[in-house]
Image (spheres, rainbow, N blue to C red):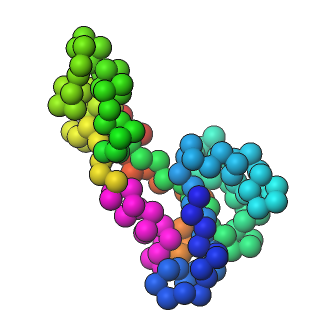
Amino acid sequence: MLCTEAVQGRPGLCSWRRAALSVPGLVTDLWLGRWRGGSDVASLGGDGFIRGKSQVRRLIRVNTLHPTNVDTVMIQNESTWRLFRPDLEHPTRDDAYEGLASVNTLPLAWIEPADVSNALLWLVSDEARYVTGIALPVDAGLAIR
């Protein structure tokens, strides 16, 4: 969870009063309504859009990022590679590349952590100050595959 309301008013951080962003899977309390004293923060609608009207009234923007495979230890490990190459006893990163790439529309197996960070920085920037209630895919086309 990234919430910039604690640093409101500091130059270069976010001139909007408050911004909230969650990375799915990391902040389950947001979806269970236990964030900030049990208030109803947001829920994901059937169309993929975030419902957070009670927070918008308080000028808190609620958005989520949905990345594809990210080049971190979370996918760059033998256990994950073995899922894509069960025929090999000790698969490598190169062995798993094609299998990992098969989930994306763009021909790449993973994106860099900076790609996700840049999307996050944009969401909390002044350029995105009117963006709220979106599920932003940073997924190399995974969602449209």
Query: Relative to 13, does residue 54 appear above or below in the rendering?
Result: above
Res 84 → quadrant: top left
Residue 145 is a magenta residue: no
Image position, residue 124 (x, y; %)? 50, 71
- Residue at 59% x, 80% y: name it: 7
Residue 121 is a magenta residue: yes
Query: Relative to 35, does residue 12 appear above or below in the rendering?
Result: below
- On the question of residue 105 being in view, the answer is no
Q: Which quadrant is the C terminus positioned in?
A: top left
> Which residue is farthest right?
38
* Span colored in magenta: 114-128
Image position, residue 80 (x, y; %)? 35, 27
Q: For this rendering, which residue is in front, 83 or 43?
A: 83
- Residue at 23% x, 40% y: name it: 108
- Residue at 25% x, 13% y: name it: 89
- On the question of residue 136 being in view, the answer is yes
Query: Relative to 69, does residue 27 appear above or below in the rendering?
Result: below
Res 41 → quadrant: bottom right
Q: Which quadrant is the N terminus positioned in?
A: bottom right
**Main SS category, magenta section:** helix
Image position, residue 23 (x, y; %)? 53, 51
Image position, residue 137 (x, y; %)? 43, 50
Res 3 → quadrant: bottom right
Q: How many discs mark residues in the rendered view? A: 0
